[in-house]
């Protein structure tokens, strides 16, 4: 098979490799499409040679001896992570906080390759009417859905979404679907602002308009009930605390790897709630698949580029530019 491997920072090499062999509880999947996630960009920049890609769709081509309920030819996608089932958090049902999650994560095969292996208990069958491209969007939709679920947003709330990459786009759509009174979204990218223009009440180009001043004005000086920081950027993180109303909530699905200087006293003095999230629960993955299949979330409209695996470096540079929506690779 062909697989993409990092050789140093910001440099993929596509090479020949042996076809993987599924273990007893695994299936072998021929990958149709694989999505580039923001977390993949962090790995790319750092040259971390672990697990390449986790959003995908494909066809089962072989099954392990102990696999039940799955057959060769089934069209599938799968949860991106697994958990131990034994730790404090797993026993509480909080599998996204599993003590061993990142150790297990690093051991799961990536999907920037012709084939990948998956434990059968992480699989989901694609409905007949769902195409492979849409199926790649199930995983990021589950991530966005979890962020909305933990936010505590209520019907009629004013919502601010800072950063309109794929997760921000999906959170904006899910917030509207959940009954938000108004959604205001910010970004630097003209193309990403356009993707959200017909979805939210107002898109705000932060290169031309002060987002804090504008959203405060739109909310009568009160601020947003819930702010989602999806950019993973210093400025957006600072703005998120300034934008939340007294007693409001800030949810941070964006991963900022730089120190952020902020007035932490804003949190107690204004009784803010701040939550972070990067994963999801299994029930949310199933719900995400259903929402896309029922066209309540139009995942396909967020796919702006499809490129062959051999062009993976170009695809990553395109993703890093912040232009467009979801970029898919086609092994």
Image: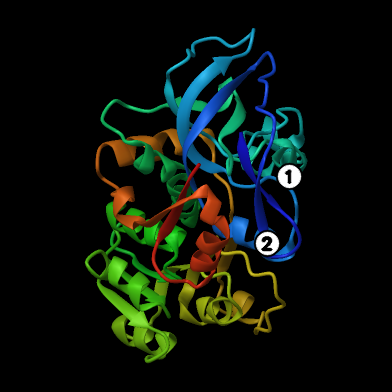
**Left or right side of 171 for 63:** right
Residue 98 found in image quarter: top right
Residue at 42% from the left image edge and 85% from the top image edge = 206
Percent from the top left, x then y, of residue 149?
45, 49
Mark sitting earlier along the chain (1/2): 2
Q: Which residue is mark 2?
A: 11
Q: Which mark is residue 102?
A: 1
Depth check, mark 1 against mark 2: the one in front is: 2
Q: Which mark is residue 276?
A: none
Percent from the top left, x then y, of residue 183?
32, 68
Residue extending farthest to the front is: 16
Camera sees residue 154 = no
Total number of numbered discs in the rendering: 2
Q: Secondary structure at mark 2?
A: loop
Task: Count residues near mark 1 (Cα–Cα under 10 Å), then give few for <14, some for 14-19, many for 20+.
Answer: some
Residue 296 found in image quarter: top left
Percent from the top left, x then y, of residue 78?
51, 33
Viewer-proximal residue among 248 and 124? 124
Residue at 65% from the left image edge and 27% from the top image edge = 19
Q: Is residue 144 above or below residue 169?
A: above
Where's the N terminus, which quadrant? top right
Q: Secondary structure at mark 1?
A: helix
Task: Count residues near mark 2 (Cα–Cα under 10 Å), then give few for <14, some for 14-19, many for 20+.
Answer: some
């Amino acid at each position: 098979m062909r697989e993409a491997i990092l050789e140093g920072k910001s440099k993929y090499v596509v090479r020949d490799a042996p076809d993987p062999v599924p273990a007893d509880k695994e299936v072998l999947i021929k990958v149709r499409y694989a999505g580039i996630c923001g977390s993949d960009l962090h790995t790319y920049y750092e040259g971390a040679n672990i697990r390449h890609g986790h959003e995908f769709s494909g066809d089962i081509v072989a099954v392990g001896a102990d696999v039940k309920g799955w057959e060769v030819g089934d069209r599938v996608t799968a949860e991106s992570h697994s958990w131990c089932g034994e730790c404090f958090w797993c026993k509480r049902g909080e599998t996204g906080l599993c003590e061993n999650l990142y150790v297990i994560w690093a051991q799961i095969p990536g999907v920037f390759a012709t084939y990948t292996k998956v434990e059968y208990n992480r699989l989901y069958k694609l409905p007949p009417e769902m195409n492979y491209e849409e199926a790649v969007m199930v995983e990021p939709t589950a991530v966005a859905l979890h962020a909305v679920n933990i936010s505590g947003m209520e019907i009629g709330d004013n919502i601010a979404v800072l950063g309109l990459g794929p997760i921000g786009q999906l959170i904006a759509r899910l917030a509207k679907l959940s009954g938000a009174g108004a959604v205001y979204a910010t970004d630097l990218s003209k193309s990403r602002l356009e993707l959200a223009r017909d979805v939210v009440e107002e898109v705000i180009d932060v290169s031309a308009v002060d987002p804090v001043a504008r959203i405060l004005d739109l909310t009568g000086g009160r601020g947003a009930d819930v702010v989602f920081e999806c950019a993973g950027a210093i400025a957006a993180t600072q703005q998120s605390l300034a934008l939340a109303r007294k007693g409001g909530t800030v949810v941070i699905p964006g991963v900022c790897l730089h120190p952020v200087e902020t007035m932490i006293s804003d949190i107690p003095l204004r009784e803010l709630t701040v939550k972070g999230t990067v994963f999801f629960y299994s029930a949310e993955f199933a719900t995400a698949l259903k929402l896309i299949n029922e066209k309540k979330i139009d995942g396909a409209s967020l796919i702006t580029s499809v490129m062959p695996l051999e062009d993976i470096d170009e695809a990553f540079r395109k993703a890093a530019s912040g232009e467009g929506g979801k970029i898919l690779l086609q092994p």
